[in-house]
Image (cartoon, rainbow, N blue to C red):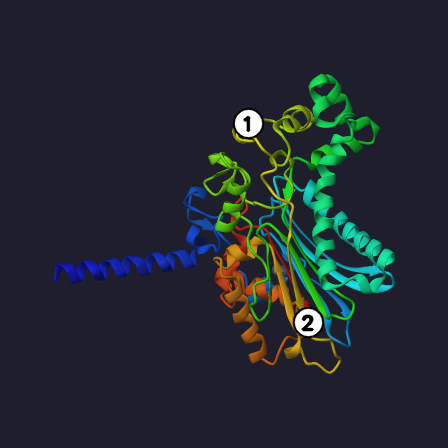
């Protein structure tokens, strides 16, 4: 009997706590989806504001800024997109791009998601300039060999080469400032290096070039030909791409991928610390990305050039922890995985059910879905067509809403209004493209 009373008392106490929690609008770390929020972010519970459905719609639109761009209304070719971060004191480091590329009078579609880290300089540079580089590489190939030369194999190679060339230029533009390159730095005093790279009173061109080397970004780019007969997806890092029918088109380039770990170890024999605790040189999660020059150049590049940036490094000790392991760079690759898929020829008679939908997302959505993005997308897809198919609403916004709480207004309210000064979920970018 004592045991029965004890159990009943516990249930009563739990019920009281739950009622208090609901009435006081209090949230605990385990109420927040994803992995950014933990017990160490206390004190818990924290307050949040309970929103109505109408308020949620307004707040989501304000925070995520969903966009829709139509490329052919008759065929239903359009792109829905967003970039979401609810913490008001933090600026998202995700970027995305939706563009048409004019290749010898033909309109190609380019979409991309970029997840920056350490800062926004490199991810912003990539968002703006990488589409231009890809366009120019495609144009050059079409002009020199004719548009018919842009075969699936040729475009795959062009995508890979253009991304690699773009990344090489980040460090190359800085080394070009020093005649003789990296080998000449030993003969140049720090004062002279600082004078060259800290040209703030002369346009800051050199400074901005060097600053790009301090940061990095993942890159996920999708390219569609004018007739929508072919799709290419190029990937560096841990963003993901897949069709709405849940075919995953990308591999994750981080320590969770045993093939990536094996690749880096194979490229650096006799260096047991090239990967430590699932991170490159024990410091960084992506095994492939744009930028992050300290992992691609010898330590002298960082110590002699980047350490002399002003403003630059406030504390070099974290960098020294991995630079001492840097023996045979590069450790991070800029070689993109490129996947090609044939598409059905677009036709005005096709219904929305017949369309192929491509989903691109940063790892923020992966985190919100507890790693099960494909299952999440499939669930939303089934519900869309159970209700008659996608309408005019933004499909990227529908995916986000389902990931953070679906029809649970209390759960969504916690994600949107939690009282914290640092981000409680990861930056999340989503693109949904109808093909």
Residue 28 shows in this picture: no
Q: Mark 1 points at which residue?
A: 320
Q: Which mark is residue 343?
A: 2
Label 1 element class: helix
For the point 57% across and 51% down, which residue is it?
238
Residue 343 lies in quadrant: bottom right
Q: Is residue 209 visible?
A: yes
Q: Where in the figure is residue 46, as x and y percent of width and height?
A: 46, 49
Residue 103 lies left or right of residue 245; in this view the side is right
Is residue 149 positioned above or below 131 on the image? below
* Along the line of sight, the residue nearer the viewer: 431 or 289: 289
Q: In the drawing, what numbered circle is on residue 44?
A: none
Q: In this view, does 257 lie above or below 241?
A: above
Res. 244 image quadrant: bottom right
Name the mark nearer the viewer: 2 or 1. 2
Percent x, y of residue 290? 66, 44
Q: Which residue lies furthest to the left in this view?
A: 1
User: Disc 2 and disc 1: Cα gap in Å?
Assistant: 49 Å
User: Front-most of 263 and 385?
Assistant: 263
Verify CB contact (< 8 Å) between mark 2 and mark 1.
no
């Amino acid at each position: 009997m004592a045991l029965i009373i004890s159990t009943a008392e516990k249930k009563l106490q739990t019920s009281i706590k739950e009622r208090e929690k609901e009435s006081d609008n209090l949230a605990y770390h385990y109420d927040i989806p994803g992995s950014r929020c933990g017990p160490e972010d206390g004190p818990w519970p924290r307050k949040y504001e309970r929103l109505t459905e109408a308020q949620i719609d307004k707040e989501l639109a304000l925070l995520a800024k969903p966009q829709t761009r139509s490329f052919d209304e008759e065929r239903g070719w359009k792109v829905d997109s967003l970039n979401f971060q609810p913490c008001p004191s933090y600026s998202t480091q995700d970027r995305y791009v939706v563009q048409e590329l004019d290749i010898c009078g033909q309109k190609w579609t380019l979409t991309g998601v970029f997840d920056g880290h350490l800062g926004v300089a490199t991810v912003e540079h990539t968002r703006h300039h990488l589409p231009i580089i890809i366009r120019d590489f495609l144009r050059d190939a079409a002009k020199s060999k004719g548009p018919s030369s842009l075969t699936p194999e040729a475009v795959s190679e062009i995508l890979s080469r253009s991304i690699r060339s773009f990344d090489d230029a980040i460090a190359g533009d800085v080394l070009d400032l020093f005649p003789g390159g990296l080998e000449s730095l030993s003969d140049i005093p720090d004062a002279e290096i600082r004078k060259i790279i800290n040209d703030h009173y002369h346009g800051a061109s050199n400074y901005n070039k060097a600053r790009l080397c301090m940061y990095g970004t993942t890159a996920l780019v999708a390219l569609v030909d004018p007739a929508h007969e072919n799709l290419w997806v190029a990937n560096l890092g841990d963003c993901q791409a897949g069709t709405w029918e849940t075919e995953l088109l990308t591999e994750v380039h981080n320590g969770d991928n045993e093939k990536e770990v094996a690749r880096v170890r194979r490229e650096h024999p006799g260096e047991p610390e090239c990967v430590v605790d699932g991170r490159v040189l024990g410091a960084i999660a992506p095994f492939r990305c744009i930028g992050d020059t300290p992992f691609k150049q010898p330590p002298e590049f960082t110590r002699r050039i980047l350490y002399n940036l002003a403003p630059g490094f406030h504390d070099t000790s974290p960098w020294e922890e991995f630079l001492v392991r840097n023996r045979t760079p590069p450790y991070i690759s800029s070689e993109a995985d490129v996947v090609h898929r044939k598409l059905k020829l677009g036709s005005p008679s096709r219904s929305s059910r017949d369309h192929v939908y491509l989903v691109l997302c940063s790892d923020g959505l992966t985190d919100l879905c507890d790693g099960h993005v494909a299952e999440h997308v499939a669930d939303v897809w089934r519900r869309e067509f159970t209700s008659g198919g996608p309408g005019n609403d933004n499909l990227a916004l529908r995916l986000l809403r389902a990931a953070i709480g679906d029809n649970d207004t209390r759960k969504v309210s916690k994600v949107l209004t939690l009282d914290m000064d640092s981000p409680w979920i990861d930056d999340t970018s989503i693109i949904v493209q109808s093909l």
